[in-house]
Amino acid sequence: MDSLFSLDILLPTLVGLPLIAAILTTLLKSPGLRASISIAMALIQLIIVATLLLWLSNSGTSLETQYQRYSLGGWGAPLGIDLAIDGFSALMLALTAALTLVLTVYSRYYFFEPHSRLDKTARFWPLWWLLIMGINALFLSGDIFNIYVTLEIIGLAAVSLVALDGSRAALTAALRYLLVGLLGSLCYLLAVALLYRAYGTLDLAQLSAIAEPTAITWAALALITTGLLLKTALVPLHFWLPLAHGSAPAPVSAILSALVVKTSFYLLARFWLDTLAPAATDYGLLMLGVLGAAAILWGSIQALRATRLKLMVAYSTVAQLGYLFLLFPLFSPDEDARGAGLSGPAVSAVGYFIVAHACAKAAMFLAAGNIMRTFGHDEIARLHGLAKYMPLSLFTFAIAGASLIGLPPSAGFLSKWLLLNVAIDTAQWWWAIIILMGGLMAAMYVFRVLNIAFISVDEKAQTEPKNLPTNKLPTIMSLCAFLLAMLTIVLGFNAELILDLVTIGDDV
Amino acid sequence: MFKTPEFKENNHANELPFATRILCATAIGALGLGLIFALILSENISSSLPALVQQNLTQSGVQNPVTAVLLNFRSYDTLLEIGVLLTVAIAMLPNSNFNSDINPHMPGGSRLVSVVNSAPVNPPLEALLRWLIPMIIVMAGYMLWTGAALPGGAFQSGALLAGAGVLAQLSGRLQFCFTSTTAKLLLTIGLITFVMVAVGVATTTGVILQYPLELAAPLILLIETAATLSIAAILLLSYNTLATQTFESSSEPSVFDKQPSALSETSAPNETLQSQTAEGPKP
Amino acid sequence: MTQESLYIIASIGLFGIGLYGVIVAPHILRKILAINIMSVGVFMLLVVSASNMNSTPDPVLHAMVLTGIVVAIAGTALALLLAVKIHTLSRDSDKDDH
């Protein structure tokens, strides 16, 4: 921790690297150069995260190294701000780095219009890297006010990215997202004020040591929950998500559904199960689980009714987010196991689910973006005969859909299996019913699209519709989507990779 | 709520029904009362932080405890906060971004500030500004310098400078164009300086953002100066963009409107707002 | 009723009024203003918590308020930009319709 060259320095580097990328892409003028630097930076970020993970898993298992911490400015909590990493946040950082690389490569081709005089990437790349910086900073942050600032960076960057193409629908969706995001952040900030009044410190680790179930702690937790539920789009506060994710450019939709909504979920898990665990009542945990179940059901119903492909995928996100909230009732049945950090079978299952869903959903959004780019529209009813023109994209969609449904050997199947195991082990079998029903409904909306895509003739119209592709798609865009879908299969076979990662911080 | 944005005053068509509003007010009122009671009845633990700040104040390089917290103890927060400002600045950048791979000469003005040589639009304002703007710049410099010991600092002086810029633009005599290289440099200089200092000190002290004791004061001043320039530029850019938006009218089609947007993800590509013309504001 | 209690009531009151405004107000500018009122309420609570009869006020809370104000400005600026752009687009498409 003393010299510059201990591997500790990798923690702030993960925040500094996207920041430098953002500054460089703001200053550079040539779109080609911006894209090349972005891909290089994404690659470096992946290498840094891989090094960090290797170091963490080899760095000993004593209680002191349960967390790795880095005190910025050398002051240390509570005076200064600490960066902290444990198993769960390490997993999220790895997911961010991997997704960033694939999506950066995809974006380079998505926005590439060499003969156009207008240059959209002038705004895309800086905002993209600022978003990535915000996500990394949030997962690494060990200070509740610092988390507020990172939430704002993520929110503002995400809104600007949604509004990127300047159409009226995108701008309206972005404005709605912004207002909801600001509302959520303000609720969170009020909670920070309450926590500081009650405990006199802003540091997560110190709070988890001294938190008590008082009225003001409970009020702070309720406010944090309201704010973060707005940002995670849990039913009934989900109204902004489908249009925001549905009107954004494809790589933006991918990162929003895969990562951005998971950041606020990560914070909810951190506060409920780790930092403010003494204030987390059983009733509250149950409420979150019930809302999650409602999200699974309602999101799937709305996905079935969606007419546009991207809207359907966005509603599918609303549904799949419900599974994440089953973590709360399933976390631990007894009181004394709480407050020991974010670990255990439920956390492993949900961590796995986050990774599986992120890859599958990103693959689906990229495939949908490819379809939209090729045909000029994404209306499900008019996608007849898609299989003829875009077999790879359709295959990607099918595999990603299989992971969402939970078919073996995908990662989705494994994560649902783990969740079912936890549900049955803790004798809360009613969640198992919800999980299975969710899988069934996901099957319905995925197969609906596949059904239409494989049929060339529209039976109602009685004629073969003129559904010819209008644009040629660069192959690498389809390959990126396909890679993400394949990742879900690879992760389905190699469960230990993820599960070992989540249990890094344990002292066993 | 939050359906489509409503722009007409007194248009009660989209308003929530009365019963819903009463329900909302009661719910918020009840929750608010609960929160007030929780706050008033709870014990306010006197935090150890103020004492800690006082203890370490001499080592921080400044005498003002708020500046010490902002730029030394919790400098990471300030770094991220300037990042937030940069995010909004990029969203506000004018749309006339040319592809420099094709056309290396960017028309539409490569100067940040240009003087408009026409008849005075607002003579009293202009006369006032001849005295006022230099005074504001001096004031801003003073606020920046005095932030070490008294209330002041980067944000305050940046806001003052931006105010001077807004007044200058309102008078119609000066015109700001943010597509130039100078502009982009100004926008990012705060963040660049901060990152360079953060990494630079790490080579000496071994920890990111840990200033060496004897260099703390000058480093803080350096960061604050660069941040002032950035903050002023970002605030002025925001004003500039919002002011030009209102004056723009697409009845004169801009040269970029002919580009069909294949990149639009929505199913109504006709309603795309393409770029503005590269002219300045029409007062 | 102590002075601090009065300020606490005022700050939570502002937060509640702002929250009501965001949900209920029809005009988009009113919603944006309501969010600003909410943030003022939170900042007021932070400043009240910083007051300390014995010595200088708590500087950490003041720093939080400064950061919060800047973040609120950024959010408001972006919201205004989006609102104005939507307005320009709706105005032009209304013109086309006639």
Image (tube, rainbow, N blue to C red):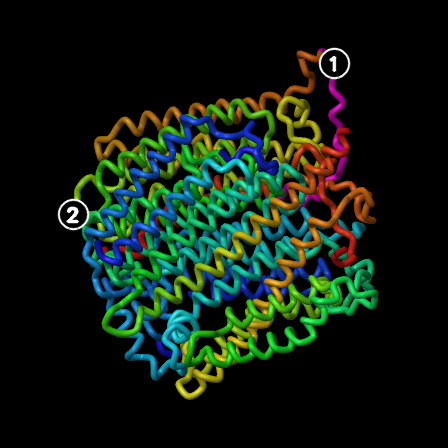
Residue count near mark 1 (Cα–Cα under 10 Å), binned few <14, some 14–19, many ≥20: few
For label 1, the residue is A463
Query: Marks 1/2: CA distance?
Result: 67 Å
Numbered mark located on residue A336 in the image = 2
Above/below status of C27 relative to B215 = above
* Chain letter belonging to callout 2: A
Q: Residue at x 63, y 63 (%)?
A: B236
Say which label, 1 or 2, has the lower sequence index.
2
Q: Nearer the viewer, mark 1 or mark 2?
A: 2
Residue A447 x, y percent position in the rendering: 53, 23
Q: Is residue A472 left or right of residue B210?
A: right
Residue count near mark 2 (Cα–Cα under 10 Å), binned few <14, some 14–19, many ≥20: few
Residue A304 x, y percent position in the rendering: 51, 23
Q: Which quadrant would the C terminus of chain A be assigned to in this image?
A: bottom left
Q: Amino acid at mark 2?
A: Asp
**Residue A62 or residue A68, whichever sits in front:** A68
Tell me where the magenta segment starts and ends, as one range: A462-480
The answer, for residue A223, to whether it is visible in the render is: yes
Residue furthest bottom as drawn: B214
